Amino acid sequence: MAARWKRLAIPLVILAFPVAFWLIISRGENHLKRLPVIGPADIAANGDTIFHTIGNFSLLNQDGRTISQADLEGKVYVANFFFASCPTICPKMNGNFLKVLQAFKGSDEVRMLSYSVDPENDSVPALKAYAGKMFADRSIWWFLTGSKDSIYALARESYLVPAAAGKTAEDFFHSDQLILIDKEKRIRGLYDGLDPYAVDTLIAEIKVLLHEYVEKN
C-alpha cells in the first residue's frame, strides 16, 4: 500500500505546481512579474532611461481640498476622466472603478483620482453629491475639478489621453481607460473601465506593483 501511495504522490506533486502558480498569479502576488513602463522615454547622457511621468497639478476635490502631486508622494494611484452628468460610459466605468475602492479600502498606499472634464458644471458641491452617490471613501477616492485648460492639458500631455476640448463635455473624447500610476509618477498600466474582468486584472496588478516596492525595501 505504501509503495502505491508513493507512485501516486509523484504525479500529484507535479500537477500541484501549475495549480499553485495559477493561484499566485490570480491573487496578484506573482513575485516574478513586473509591469511595463508605458509612454515615451529618453536616454540620459549617462545611459539611464528617463521615463515619461505625470506632471504636477493643483485641483480641488469633492471636499474643497486642494490636491496636488505632493498628496500622492509614496502612493500608487489609478486615474480616470469623467463628468458627473455623463449619461453614457461614465456611470458604468465608475461603477466598475468602485471595485478598486472595495479591494483597497483602508489602504495608505493606494489612491483613486477621477478628473472632471466638465469643470464648469462639476463644482465642488456637484462632485460631493456625485461622490456620495458612488459611496466613495474620500480618504482614497478623490473627484477633482479646476481649470478646464489645465485638466485637458493634463489628460493630453501627462496621461496621454486624447482630449479635444469643445463647447461641452460631450465633445471630450470619451476615454474608458483606468490608468495605473506608480510612486515615481510613471504610467504602468491601461485598463478598460467598462470591462469588469479588466478591472479585476487592474486590482491584481496593483498588488503586483505594490510588491515591487516591498522587494526594493
Image: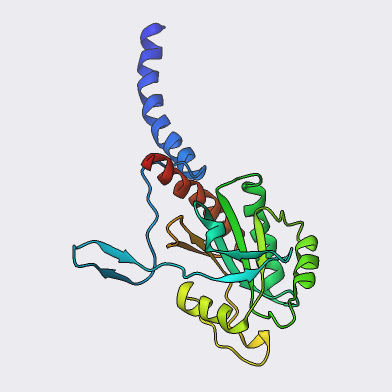
Residue 120 coordinates in the image, percent (x, y): 71, 83
Towards the viewer: 197 or 62: 62
Residue at image x 57%, y 51%? 110
Q: How is the image coloured?
A: rainbow
Towards the viewer: 122 or 84: 122
Residue 199's quadrant in the figure?
bottom right
Of all residues shown, which one is farthest toward the bottom?
Answer: 167
* Vertical order, 76 against 2 (above or below): below
Of all residues shown, which one is farthest toward the top?
Answer: 1
> Does residue 8 appear left or right of residue 120 in this picture?
left
Residue 118 coordinates in the image, percent (x, y): 68, 81
* Vertical order, 140 against 173 (above or below): above
Residue at image x 73%, y 74%? 84
Residue 153 coordinates in the image, percent (x, y): 52, 81
> Does residue 17 appear left or right of residue 60 in this picture?
left
* Vertical order, 157 against 190 (above or below): below
Towards the viewer: 44 or 9: 44
Name the quarter where the C terminus is drawn: top left
Of all residues shown, which one is farthest toward the left?
Answer: 46
Name the quarter where the N terminus is drawn: top left
Residue 147 coordinates in the image, percent (x, y): 62, 80
Residue at image x 39%, y 66%? 38
> Does residue 137 appear left or right of residue 56 in this picture?
right
Q: How many marks?
A: 0
Residue at image x 76%, y 61%? 134
